[in-house]
Image (spheres, rainbow, N blue to C red):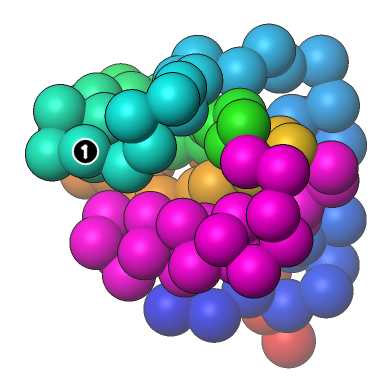
Amino acid sequence: MTLTNKQKQYLKGLAHSLKPVVLLGQHGLTEGVLAEIDLALNFHELIKVKVASEDRDTKALIIDAIVRETKAIKVQNIGHVLTLYRASEEKKISLPRAK
């Protein structure tokens, strides 16, 4: 699933007031952290993850791994905070229609 620019803008607006629900610490991306992100996506659909890595390349690899493993869509990445979206069966968030 891909999002249109209009849908991404809508999700960015919804995510603005959210706080990160998962924080990656010194141990990096572990199976437990991935499971927690997956659980949060199932419950909330739209979440923020704080990736505490000083190296840009490492941070990019971690973000790619999170998106790939959770099958989520990267909405935006600002600084150390990554915003992810994945629709659940309940469809809590109704996106603007794609044209």
**Residue range of the region highlighted in magenta in the rendering:** 53-79
Residue 64 in magenta?
yes
Residue 7 in the image, given as x and y percentages of width and height: 74, 62
The residue at the point 63 percent across, 41 percent down is 53
Judge the density around disc 1: few (<14), some (14-19), many (≥20) Cα neighbours within 10 Å: few
Up/down of 3 relative to 94, above or below: below
Q: Quadrant of the N terminus?
A: bottom left
Residue 43 in the image, given as x and y percentages of width and height: 30, 23
Residue 25 in the image, given as x and y percentages of width and height: 45, 22
The residue labelled by disc 1 is 30
Return the residue nearer the eye: 35 or 93.
35
85 relative position to 81: left or right: left
Residue 57 in the image, given as x and y percentages of width and height: 64, 69
Which image quadrant for residue 68?
Answer: bottom left
Q: SS class of the residue under badge 1? A: loop
**What residue type is disc 1 on?**
Thr
Q: Quadrant of the C terminus?
A: bottom right
The residue at the point 54 percent across, 80 percent down is 2
Up/down of 30 relative to 20, above or below: below
